[in-house]
């Protein structure tokens, strides 16, 4: 059986919690946007939520494949509403930055403990976070540009309107 340090195991379980909280945050944001009839933005964040859920599953699979029993932690509740769209989008960007710092920390822990089997997974997620932060920043910048015409902003929130592939 391949081994991981206890420090990395614990940190990876914390990361699963954070990824599931990301899912929960984006799902709540999508629901709030839908309640305001911003259908395209809601759909965009529904897709983001699913992506975050898949990230949690990737970390889970890695731990299971490494012979680790995954322990699930209690999730924090996301906001159900925001004062306005800009505040919500800033919160999404700040959350992505938090996730980035968490993955940086995982890489540091893996390096310090010579947990070499984690490096490919963590490298992939470091690269993913570059895209995630850039996308969250772009969404916020687009909103700021179009906030006098929120209907057009919502219209331009289709996944195909972003350079995500």
Image (tube, rainbow, N blue to C red):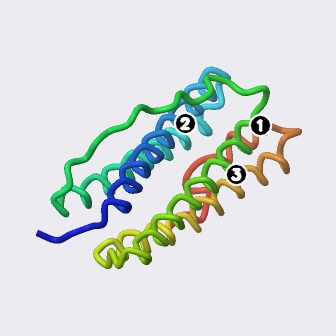
Question: Residue 30 shows which numbered tag?
Answer: none
What is the secondary structure assignment of the residue under circle 3?
A: helix
- Horizontal and vertical percent for residue 104? 54, 67
Q: Crowding near pointer 3: few (<14 within 10 Å), some, many (20+)? A: many
Which mark is in front, 2 or 3? Answer: 2
Residues tagged 3 and 1 counted as in contact (Cβ below 8 A)? no
| Residue at 69% over, 39% down | 154
Check the picture and name the quadrant holding the N terminus. Answer: bottom left
Q: Is residue 74 left or right of residue 138?
A: left
Q: In this view, does 5 lie to the left or right of 43?
A: left
| Residue at 71% over, 57% down | 137
Q: Earlier in the sequence, mark 3 or mark 1?
A: 1
Q: Is residue 61 left or right of residue 9?
A: left
Residue at which label 1 appears: 87
Q: Earlier in the sequence, mark 1 or mark 2?
A: 2
Q: Distance between the residues labelled 3 and 1?
A: 12 Å
Q: In this view, does 72 lie to the left or right of 159?
A: left
Residue at which label 2 appears: 25
Residue at which label 3 appears: 139
| Residue at 25% over, 58% down | 63
């Amino acid at each position: 059986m391949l081994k991981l340090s206890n420090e990395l195991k614990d940190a990876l379980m914390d990361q699963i919690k954070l990824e599931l909280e990301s899912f929960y945050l984006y799902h709540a944001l999508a629901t709030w946007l839908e309640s305001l009839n911003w259908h395209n933005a809601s759909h965009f964040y529904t897709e983001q939520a699913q992506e975050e859920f898949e990230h949690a599953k990737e970390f889970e699979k890695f731990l299971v494949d490494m012979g680790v029993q995954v322990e699930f932690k209690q999730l924090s509740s996301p906001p159900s509403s925001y004062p306005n769209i800009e505040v919500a989008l800033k919160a999404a960007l700040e959350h992505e930055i938090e996730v980035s710092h968490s993955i940086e920390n995982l890489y540091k822990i893996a390096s310090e403990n010579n947990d070499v089997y984690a490096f490919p997974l963590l490298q992939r997620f470091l690269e993913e976070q570059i895209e995630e932060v850039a996308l969250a920043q772009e969404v916020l910048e687009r909103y700021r540009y179009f906030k006098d015409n929120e209907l057009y902003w919502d219209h331009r929130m289709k996944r195909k309107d972003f350079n995500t592939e």
